[in-house]
Amino acid sequence: MKYIFIISIFCLSLAVKAQENDLMALLNDQTEEPIIYAEATFKGSRLINGHTVQTRKAKAFEFLISHRFGRLNSGAYELFGIDGANIRLGFEYGLSDRITIGLGRNSFEKTFDSFMKVKLLKQSKGRKVMPFSAVFLTSAALKTLKGQEGFTTTVSKLTYTHQLLIARKFNNSFSFQVMPTIIHRNMILVEQENSDVFALGVGGRFKLTQRVSLNAEYYQRFDVPEADLNYNSLAVGVDIETGGHVFQLHLTNSRAMIEKGFITETSGDFFNGDIHFGFNVSRVF
């Protein structure tokens, strides 16, 4: 009987010790620092001309209308650019929270485009620290404009773009993004052009109010041939958020609304007055 009592006391003490350990583990789990992800680094999927690190939620659908008028300095004959408008209609879908695909059609050079964005990293703090978000973008564009000398096959009309979008939301007011880019053109018209174009884009957003922000974007090309008559793309604008819509109003020297166009085919000098007024309107369903 004495041994039974001793063994019972021993087993009871082990049970109490185990419960104490379980309770401590539970308390540690509850007090462990959470992971806090940065949300809404940018309000939309476009900074101005180019993409941002924002991807669509899984099964979310976005309809995007982009519009660029002609040059403001074209004079009254062209109604200060209204007569020379270009438009792009785009459709984007979230395959998952990390993968977005999209299709679009541009009146500029009658170009069809498609893309895929894959979120590689998401900015976070707390138990898991990641100082920035990163997204890989790959796209293809097919120019269908007729009468282009030399562009006789479908393959010759294709252009491919690859970008790594890296962004950081520094606080609730300011976000910054860099965009290293490579563009490959299957065919070029003159020997002075490069089939492969390397560029680095930079851009940012500064919130003026809860629903209004000021945006800017610039792309610097590298190893540009002296005979190249194009300019680097520059754009400034304002974002206005109204519920499910985001209105983007901007000024830019680029007519095109996809990477192969505004990075490699911007023919106007922003500081010489070759400026296009434009807007993007998006609706997420």
Image (cartoon, rainbow, N blue to C red):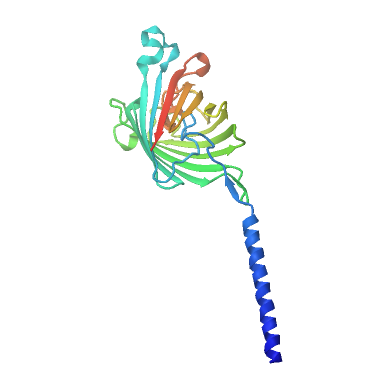
Q: Residue at x 48, y 43 (%)?
A: 136
Give percent across and percent down for residue 211: 52, 28
Q: Residue furthest bottom?
A: 1
The answer to which of 117 and 157 lies nearer the viewer is 117
**With respect to residue 273, does 224 lie above or below?**
below
Res. 228 in view: no
The answer to which of 186 and 52 lies nearer the viewer is 52
In the picture, the quarter occupied by the N terminus is bottom right
Please give left or right for residue 1 compared with residue 55 in the image.
right
The answer to which of 228 and 68 lies nearer the viewer is 68
Q: Residue at x 40, y 42 (%)?
A: 60
Q: Quadrant of residue 87?
A: top left
**With respect to residue 22, does 261 lie above or below?**
above
In the picture, the quarter occupied by the C terminus is top left
Give percent across and percent down for residue 117: 44, 42
Q: Residue at x 58, y 28 (%)?
A: 206
Q: Give the mark count.
A: 0
Give percent across and percent down for residue 3: 70, 90
**With respect to residue 202, does 120 lie above or below?**
below
Q: Quadrant of residue 260?
A: top left
Q: Quadrant of residue 73?
A: top left
Give percent across and percent down for residue 53: 50, 39
The answer to which of 67 and 221 lies nearer the viewer is 67
Q: Residue at x 67, y 69 (%)?
A: 20
Res. 284 in view: yes
